Image: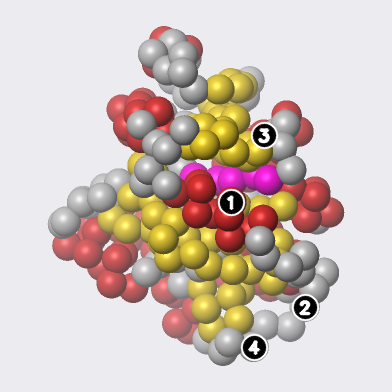
Amino acid sequence: KISLPVSLFVPCFERFAQTESLLMSLANADFTCQVILIDDHSSRPFEPLLSHFQNLEIVHRRNPVNRGPAISRNIGLEVASHGFVAFTDNDCCVSPTWLIELHKSLSEAPSPIAGVGGRVLAKGNDIYSRYYDFHKLLDPWYFRGQYYYITTANAIYRKHTVQAVKGFDPSVAQAGGEDPGLCFKLLNLGYAFGYNQDAIVFHDYAPSLLSFMRNLYRYGYGCYGQSKKHYRSLPFVESTTFGGMRG
């Protein structure tokens, strides 16, 4: 296995079986890295699950109260050992070479590139999963010759750039918008983003109409709010497509 100088952040709230699937995919991957798992005050502790993955370098923290994924990732940033920080979610599984691809892309990129994102493919084949895949809702968003954001389902950053903007916006209390918000703050400083289509994670979407509608609302509302708050001049900010679909 290739040992990478990367700290991987995974905010966790419930989803014990899905978290186990993610850790299994990391255990079977072609790389090793520091894994920082932040338990956002789940109903029961994660320690019994983590004990089955002694081969992984896991740093575990548990929030005393539920604080949301943005603050959880900021907590992870404080204990990260490496100069590259990567992100995925605990309802994802990674492909064997996922982080190798991301790290290679960013380490070879010029310094104005703050981060690189990859492809997020649906794990399932239900109608909702196929919709996410068709519209590439969690892939980096490319618009008029520029990537405007990459998502924390599949991303790597230079740690000092994330620290330069004080991490994720702690006012975002639930998932949806905090990752575009980070990118908008970095764009303000003149940074840019890249994309590697070979860096693949598989997202386990709930096959439920209610979950689907909630996700679209959170993505759109959160991203629109973060764009208004953090980015000085968005050419697409009045677009109903952006506000409703690509958050």
| Magenta residues (range) | 84-88
Separation of residues labelled 1 and 2 (CA atoms): 30 Å
Q: Quadrant of residue 35?
A: top right
The picture places residue 44, in percent across and down from the top left corner, at 43, 15
- Density class for disc 3 (Cα within 10 Å; few <14, some 14-19, many ≥20) is many
- Under mark 3, the amino acid is Gly
Magenta highlight: main SS: strand
Q: At 65% across and 38% down in the image, what residue appears?
A: 5
Q: At 57% across and 34% down in the image, what residue appears?
A: 3
Whether residues under marks 1 and 4 lie with C-beta atoms below 8 angstroms apart, the answer is: no
Of all residues, the one furthest to the front in this rendering is: 1
Q: Which residue is mark 3?
A: 76
Separation of residues labelled 4 and 3 (CA atoms): 33 Å
Q: Earlier in the sequence, mark 1 or mark 2?
A: 1
Q: Is residue 30 visible?
A: yes
Secondary structure at badge 3 equals helix
- From the image, state whether disc 1 or disc 4 is nearer to you: 1
The picture places residue 135, in percent across and down from the top left corner, at 33, 73
Q: Which residue is mark 2?
A: 232
- Under mark 2, the amino acid is Arg
- Under mark 4, the amino acid is Pro
- Under mark 1, the amino acid is His
Secondary structure at badge 2 equals loop
